[in-house]
Image (cartoon, grey):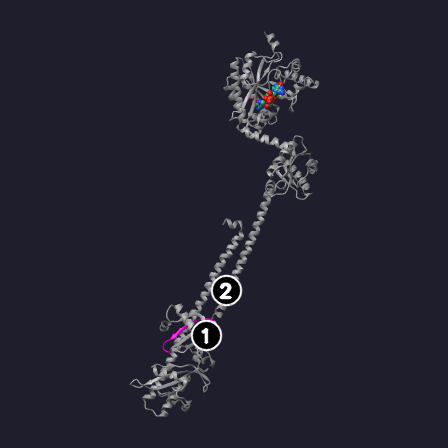
Amino acid sequence: MKIFKRDIWKLYYTIVVLSLIFFFIISYALWNQKISAYKDRQETYAISTAYYIENLFSQYETILDIVGKNILNHNLTPQQEKKMLDQMLLLNPTLAGVGLFKPDGTPYLATSNIDVKKIPNLLQTKKTREGFLDALESDRMVVGRTYYLEALKSLVIPIRKALYDKKGDVVAVIASGISLSKKNQFIHSLLGANKIFILRDKDNYLQFYDFEEYLYRKPVGKRALADIFQIMEQVYAKPLRELKNSEAVISVTCTSYITGKLSYSSYKYIKRYKEWIVVTTPLTIIRAEYLNQELILLAIYILILFIIYYLIGVIDRNEMQKQRTLKEQAIRDSLTSLYNRYYIEEKIKNFKSKYTLFFIDLDGFKSINDSFGHEYGDKVLQIIAARLMSLAKKEEHRDIIRYSGDEFILITEFMSDDSIGVCAKGILHAISGEFVIDEFKFVLGASIGVARYPYDGKNFDEVKRYADLAMYKAKEMKNSFVIFHEAIKEKYLRSAMMERELKMALSRGEISMVYQPQVYIDGKIYGVEALVRWNNETLGFVPPDEFIAIAEITGLIKDIGRFIISKVLEDVYEIQQAAKKEFHLSINISAKQFSQHDFLSCIIGKVTASQIKTELISLEITETVFIEDKKHVIAILEDIKKQGMKISLDDFGTGYSSMNILRNLPIDELKIDKSFIDDIVEEKDTRQIVHSIIIIAKSLGLQVVAEGVENMEQKEILESFGCDIYQGYLFAKPMKKEELVEKLIKNKGIFLSTLKNSMLNFEI
Ligand code: C2E
Ligand code: CA
Ligand code: CA
């Protein structure tokens, strides 16, 4: 059934084939029925006709017998005899005349309508000799060949019967003839219809067929008749003799020896008079009759087929229309009516020619959605879609697709860098035009990445991915476009590889921790910042800021973050034990890590389980954690503080936040970013900024840590501003656990490389 659903015409062809078979079966049955009807009819005719003819002949036999015996047995005078014969003729007008013959063939008495003298000797006349002899030898009436009797102007069937005396010797032969003139109504009504005739078995002459004299002059074709008898024997599987003896009706299809046409004939043999009664119908007549019915059947059949054809056509057209609409719906985006990604994926599959793909991502669309709601977001997309559509329509073979959300793809012919520039600027221009929805004015930008097939990628997915990467590059500048080039690809491939490798980094033990001391102004250790390290066999040393970003995107940060927390708590406890010194521990927490729902319980669990005093632990967070849900973040920070831990705001000064926000945040420490420290000696402005940061932080009761202190000048300036804690290469680089233990013991907890000796001396 499924196959028909897929192609309904197959159902039609199946119907045609099956109905054709059915039609042939019906036609064949119809033909058989026709033949069988003819068989029944013809056989009934043959039986009844044979019955009548036999009766008729036996009636004549009886008459001849009675009259003949009367004449012989009553010594009558010749006049009386003649009178008797005449009376007989009078009573039987169908008889042509009656005569009596001596056994030697000489005539001696005849009815008045015949002159005895003119009658020849029947034994000596060639025509009559055989019949006469037959009559002499038979105790039955013998029927002779039909001939034309000029005197009567009519066909006559001669009949003769031998008359015997008491001893059984033939004394005379009485002869007569059955007139076949039109007066003989009985014969006419019986045989009048052309299709019945009587055939003599003895000599194959027609006994009666029609009123034409020539028919009776010679026997019917011997060969043709032999053929028919042979067919009979085959069909009935009996020898002819047996068939004749049984007097059964025999029906066969054969070539008529009279008309030469193929006919359906029924034969019935009359044993007593050796005559065949034949009923026959030319096949052409049966066929014509059959064809009349067959034509009606055919007409009905064709009509039904046509109706089915028409209905299936209607169903098929509807189905195709439905499928077209479904297909159209499937490849169209319902909001903008642009093609969707399924369309492009389908189309591009068969796309062999070169093309250029523009990956367009709207700038700032998210904020429209967030601040005005999705209703406005949808309208904005519709407007932008319409603009892009009209842009695409200007040139042939350009498709614009809404790929997802606020991402669109434009496919054009293959373009040079210059043409791409013109086209991309056109797109940016079209998008950045101001538009008004209700009373609100909007101005949007877009970032476009462009890649070309087969120049940049060897299939659509690759080209799209590279255009996407180029778009991310463009995003850094906003409202601009970037054409994909190798460097972008390399960066992408490196991060793809990094992603692959990072997945296995933990299990392979590639992740380790180092610790960078944080010191007071005199170099005495305040604490350490734990910093993660990743050494990979293929990638080598990967800087933490690079792989942490990837771990955040891929979600691997969850496991890595947990590992770091457990590891540093364990390490630092060991260090403290080994060096017999307690100090602070700062752990970096990434924004993604922070937003995990189980972060709080995890950190509290691990910290309370460790043997390090909670008040010695600070979590370093950056301003980015506040981007998401500030209230929620503050609540978590407060929970952390309740446990006794401290919060440190890392990289301060690089983000968007002002000093003002510090007031509301539950933090304990501020880490001034290295970029400020770098310029503090050279730039007065920076110096002033750092100074004010320290003043405000102090006024808020926050501890200040300076990061990346590399030289004495930096240290002295910071010292003069009243900075609390220092971290940087000037004091110590990040180091392994063992090294830190060693140094702590050796330097007695003091890190101040350049001043080492004097400081130590001073202490001593
Ligand atoms: P950060 O938190 O600002 O860490 C300080 C970075 O400055 C460290 O780089 C440190 O080695 C470097 N540094 C310290 N003193 C000096 C100096 O005098 N000169 C110079 N040139 N550099 C100095 P590092 O270890 O490469 O870490 C880079 C960043 O990766 C970190 O910046 C932090 O954002 C992230 N990170 C490192 N470890 C972890 C971690 O365990 N967890 C998380 N979430 N992030 C981490
Ligand atoms: Ca840090
Ligand atoms: Ca930092």
Q: 602 above or below 414?
A: above
In the rendered image, residue 330 lying in the magenta stretch gets the answer no
Type of amino acid at the residue the image marks with label 1: Tyr
Q: Is mark 2 in CB contact (under 8 Å) with mark 1?
A: no
Instruction: Mark 2: give few (<14), some (14-19) or many (20+) Cα within 10 Å.
Output: some
Q: Residue furthest left?
A: 167
Residue 176: x percent and y percent? Answer: 39, 85
Residue 516 falls in image quadrant: top right
Disc 2 residue lies near ligand 1 with CB under 8 A? no
Question: 438 or 191: which is nearer to us?
Answer: 191
Residue position marked by numbered label 2 in the rendering: 294
Quarter of the displayed picture in which ligand 1 can be seen? top right
Residue 299: x percent and y percent? Answer: 53, 62
Q: From the viewer's perspective, is 182 left or right of 735?
A: left
Helix, strand or loop at label 2? It is helix
Residue 552: x percent and y percent? Answer: 57, 28
- What residue range appears in magenta? 262-273
Helix, strand or loop at label 1? It is loop
Residue at position x 53%, y 50% in the image: 7
In the rendered image, residue 265 lying in the magenta stretch gets the answer yes
Residue 466: x percent and y percent? Answer: 62, 35
Return the disc, 2 or 1, that comes first in the chain's sequence: 1
Q: 428 above or below 626?
A: below
Type of amino acid at the residue the image marks with label 2: Glu
Residue position marked by numbered label 1 in the rendering: 257
Secondary structure mostly seen in the magenta stretch: strand
